[in-house]
Amino acid sequence: MPWIRLSHDNSTDSVVLAMQHGAVDFVPKPVDMNRLLGAIRRTLAARDAATVHEDRHVMRQEPLPRP
């Protein structure tokens, strides 16, 4: 599940730590709604692209052998 970190602590260490723990983006507080919406759009687009890639990979696989 992709997630975006929102925090009042926007130090480099905090951003790096969030990314190391799996955040896909970091938005500092107070939240700029345009920045947050952009982060959400990028996250959803990346998720959708990964899903399409995964679906294509699964469709190309050989069928399972019959017992």
Image (cartoon, rainbow, N blue to C red):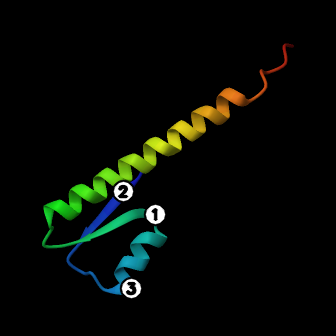
Q: Contact, CB < 8 Å: mark 2 with mark 1?
A: yes
Kindly report the distance in space between the C-alpha atoms of the residues bearing marks 3 and 2.
18 Å
Of residue 3 and residue 62, the one placed in the foreground of this image is: 62
Quadrant of the frame with the C terminus: top right
Of residue 48 and residue 65, the one placed in the foreground of this image is: 48
Kindly report the distance in space between the C-alpha atoms of the residues bearing marks 2 and 1.
7 Å
**Is residue 1 in sight in this rendering?**
no
Of residue 46 and residue 10, the one placed in the foreground of this image is: 46
**Is residue 8 in sight in this rendering?**
yes
Identity of the amino acid at label 2? Trp
Which corner quadrant of the image does residue 42 belong to?
bottom left
User: What number is the disc on residue 3?
Assistant: 2
Residue labelled with disc 3: 13
User: What number is the disc on residue 57?
Assistant: none
55 to 15, vertically: above or below? above
Secondary structure of the residue carrying numbered label 3: helix
Kindly report the distance in space between the C-alpha atoms of the residues bearing marks 3 and 1.
14 Å
- Which percent across, then down, holds residue 65? 84, 18
Side of 50 where 13 appears, left or right? left
Give the crowd class for mark 3: few <14, some 14-19, many >=20 residues within 10 Å: few
Of residue 40 and residue 3, the one placed in the foreground of this image is: 40
Identity of the amino acid at label 1? Gly
- Which percent across, then down, holds residue 3? 36, 56
Secondary structure of the residue carrying numbered label 2: strand
Identity of the amino acid at label 3? Asp
Q: What is the number of callouts on the image?
A: 3
Residue labelled with disc 1: 22
Say which residue appears at 38% left-offset and 85% top-offset. 13
